[in-house]
Image: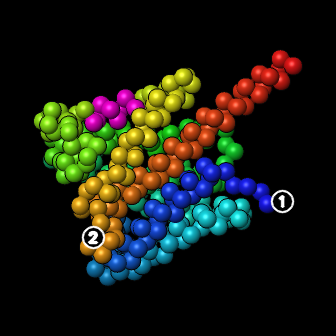
Amino acid sequence: MKKSVPLLSVVVIACISLSFALLALSSFTGVDAGLVKILGFYQFNKEADLPLVRQLSSILFGLLALLPWLTLRYGSLKKLLALLLLLCAIPPLVSLTGSIHWIESLGGFPAIGSGQGIIKYAALLALAWYFWRPESKVQHWVQYAPVALVLVWIGGMKFTQIEAEGIVDLVQSSPLMSWLYLLFDLQTTSNLIGIYDLLALLLLGAGLQYRWLFLPGWLMCLAVFLTTQSFLLSFPGAFSANGLLTASGQFLIKDLWFIASMLLLLNWYFTADFTAKRQQQISQS
């Protein structure tokens, strides 16, 4: 009898595959958000090396769009998928150690500029860990780590004027958030978003220890990433005229990786809860 595949695994893989499929198509057509700066960090000749690196990136993204589905049938491919996710994530993340992604007018590190799209690659490290060691006892902390990194860093930037002004087009275009500007000025709106991000993160982190806090924190964090995905539909600059992702769209689509991590956290919550109850039943019998 053919073994059934849990729905959650399918949704996690769909998030990963869809994001990389769209990244591959847009990269192939010449959209490469952050690639020039990353090449600059590694001191490549940008003009000569950019076309080749863009093609290699498109191939890697294409493989990462296809391979997750193959792991459903061939479990032995999971470790290959994990290695490719690491290959995709590590070079951009290492470039954060340079000064190219920091805002000098705000003092440099930790005031992050173009690196806001780069730190999202941290989610791939957690997903690589999942495919390499799915039964790890620290899986929930591994998946929580990139969520914490992004919400602390990008959420913290919301308290700066440059970030408050930078999100105006996204917020104004969103039917979910544009009403905030009717009640508050730009900076107050940005501050409130930052406060929400940090509060959601604290609740989720506490929920990993105190289970009654988990679902409120999880729902609040998930709402952050789902709202970001809604910008793909509401923000006119997310897609180009030919229907492929722009640089802004590439930045937004990466939140699908965090949605995948959030689903894995939910799976941990219910699995751990079931295991605890089962052990309690056994001890009482």
Q: Quadrant of the C terminus?
A: top right
- What residue appears at the point 34 percent right and 78 percent down from the top-left corner? 29
Where residue 56 sits in the image (x, y, percent)? 45, 76
Q: Which mark is residue 1?
A: 1
**Vertically, is 245 above or below 255?**
below
Is 168 placed left or right of 61 in the picture?
Answer: left
Identified by mark 1, the residue type is Met
* In this view, 228 is above or below 213: below
Q: CA distance from mark 2 to mark 1?
A: 46 Å
Give the magenta range: 193-200
Q: Quadrant of the N terminus?
A: bottom right
| Viewer-closest of 256 and 89 | 256
Asked whether residue 108 appears in the rendered view, the answer is no
Chain-order first, disc 2 or disc 1: 1
Q: Is residue 141 left or right of residue 149?
A: right
The answer to whether 111 is drawn above or below residue 87 in the figure is above
| Quadrant of the rendered image containing residue 147 | top left
Task: Return the residue at label 2.
Answer: 240
Instruction: Tell me the element at label 2.
Output: loop
> Which residue lies most toward the front here?
175
Q: Picture coordinates of residue 71 (x, y %)?
A: 66, 63
